[in-house]
Amino acid sequence: MLSVLPLQAQTDLSEAEQRRFDYYYMESVNSKLRQDYANAYLMLEHCLAINPTSAAAYYELSQYYLMLGQTPKGMEALEKAVKYGPDNYWYGQGLANLYLQQGQEGKALELIEQMAEHFPSHIELLYTLESLYARTENYDKVIEVLNTLEQKRGKSEALTMEKYRIYREMNDEKRAFKELEGLVKEYPNELRYQVALGDAYLQTGKQEKAYDIYQDVLKKEPDNANALYSLASYYELTDKKALYEQTLDSLLLNRKVEDAVKTNVMRRLIVQVEQEERDSTQIIRRFDRILEQDTENADLTMLYAQYLIAKNMEQEANPVLRKLLQIDPTNSGGRMILLQDAIREEDYGEIINLCEAGVEASPEALEFYFYLSIAYAHEQRHDDVLRICTQALEHVNENSTKEVVSDFYAMMGDTYHTQGKLTEAYQAYEKAIEAYGNNISALNNYAYYLSLEKRDLDKAEEMSYKTVKAEPENGTYLDTYAWILFVKGNYTQAKLYIDMAMNAEGDKSADVVEHCGDIYYKSGETAAALEYWKQALELGSDSAKLKQKINQKRYVE
């Protein structure tokens, strides 16, 4: 028998010994705060040399052993802390948890039994005991603990249902039902307890008793959702399909039944239909009938849309989602589903409609600003891009990801450059890179635009190299790097990277092919350069300079 809680005699210290003990103990505390654990440990040893029954010193010592992974020594020290400090609840709690962590459930159980007796106000110990007894299927002890809890806290639905469950495990049906009947007797006006008793009867084959209870409840409260659902379950179990459907309708088409209840009932029906692999059209028909009448139930509408999507019925889900947004414009989840569909279809008009409304309804949701700015850019609404990015950045907080913040600045940089506002563009790119140094797209665009102006070429090369290193097979990034090398006069390296760009997967733009011709020309391969310039022209370039290169068969600055 583990004996750690009976009060132990403490060592009597002289006044001088007590002063020495206090000094060493405070030194150990200060050393711990300085993270000087070696000295803290040494000070505790001095404490125990003076007072070998100091619970506090043993507790602190146990923490160092556990921190060092010396679990047996830590457990031994913690046991002594509990032995010499029996009135400290937290020492006992720590030891019990350690026993459980180490798989010593027997020791944990014995200790918690003693603690439950020693600390009667700590109700949580009884719940722990119940769990441990249940784990070992010691059901008599579980009932004993539950009775104690009932004496301390009064009769409750949770405790009664747990006692009912345990008695069922013990095959003691008589006492199981006595518990539920006692709950009904204790709270005669709580109709949900009567329904719970009826459900228990139904689960154990006492169908007529269950039916009588449901009917009795519905006489008192005809719109009682729990009773209606349980009665429907009774009709389904007894193969009365027409009455089953009629009772479900009485529940789901009843305006007095709360929206949340209807939604939960539909969730249960979905699970049931899926488990039994029944035809899903009955669920769809039921959703349609409810929503024809109950037009403002946002949760139920969202559940319907999710069900249709799960059934690969995206087209049918879209009008349901649109109805959802009419009911609740702040439902970002439903809006995002529609938005993803619009993005897939590249329907920029629809993206703009959804995101403009999304920004207004959910101003904190940065994803709507993000996709809206992209759609505006596609439609060449440059002022709107700048406006919406600026607006988005006003809603950035500590939870916003640095990548998203960086992307907004990068889009502003791209837009300013399109407008010919180079100073503002470069400032925006700097902020994008400051927010997130690995924004590859921003690095590439910034570097390329600098090279076009032939300014800060070393910085441009450094930024561009980061993009090539990050995505070594990206033709766009390889082209930018090759072009910067070309502008710097490093034609040999430029030719190496432009060849890699030309060999990368994907279609080549006229600009890339023209760059290739320029680099080949400076590398001394005039014939090849001319062919690449002609290819660039065929790809749709209408550059006068390109035509001049072809006509004069030479590179033109």
Image: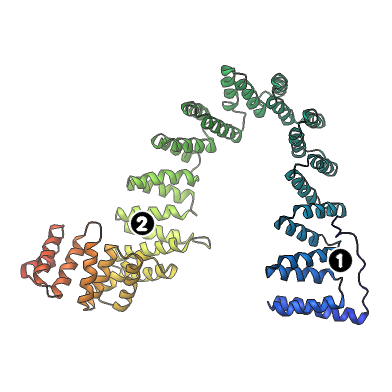
Residue 31 location (% of width, % of height): 72, 79
Q: Earlier in the sequence, mark 2 or mark 1?
A: 1
Q: Residues within 10 Å of mark 1 (few under 14, many from 20)?
A: many
Question: Picture quarter containing residue 41?
Answer: bottom right
In the image, what residue occupies the spot 76% across and 60% down?
94
* Amino acid identity at mark 1: Tyr
Camera-nearest residue between 327 and 446: 446
Identified at 7% across, 70% down, the residue is 553
Q: Residue 439 occupies which quadrant of the picture?
A: bottom left
Q: Residue furthest left?
A: 551
The circle on residue 4 is none
Describe the element under mark 2 as helix, strand or loop.
helix
Q: Is residue 294 above or below residue 16?
A: above
Relative to 409, 556 lies left or right = left
Q: Position of residue 545 (x, y in %)?
A: 13, 68
Amino acid carrying label 2: it is Asp
Q: Is residue 423 visible?
A: no
Q: 191 and 78: which one is in front?
A: 78
Quadrant position of the C terminus in the picture:
bottom left
Instruction: Count all numbered tags in the image, as a single digit.
Output: 2
Residue name at image x 18 percent, y 64 percent: 513
In the image, is residue 108 above or below residue 310?
below
10 Å neighbourhood of mark 2: few (<14), some, or many (≥20)?
some
Q: Position of residue 452 (x, y in %)?
A: 24, 72
Badge 2 is on which residue? 384
- Which corner quadrant of the image does residue 429 belong to? bottom left
Residue 383 is situated, as x and y percent measured from the top left of the image, at 34, 59
Quarter of the figure with the N terminus: bottom right
Q: Which mark is residue 84?
A: 1
* Side of 299 relative to 358 (left or right): right
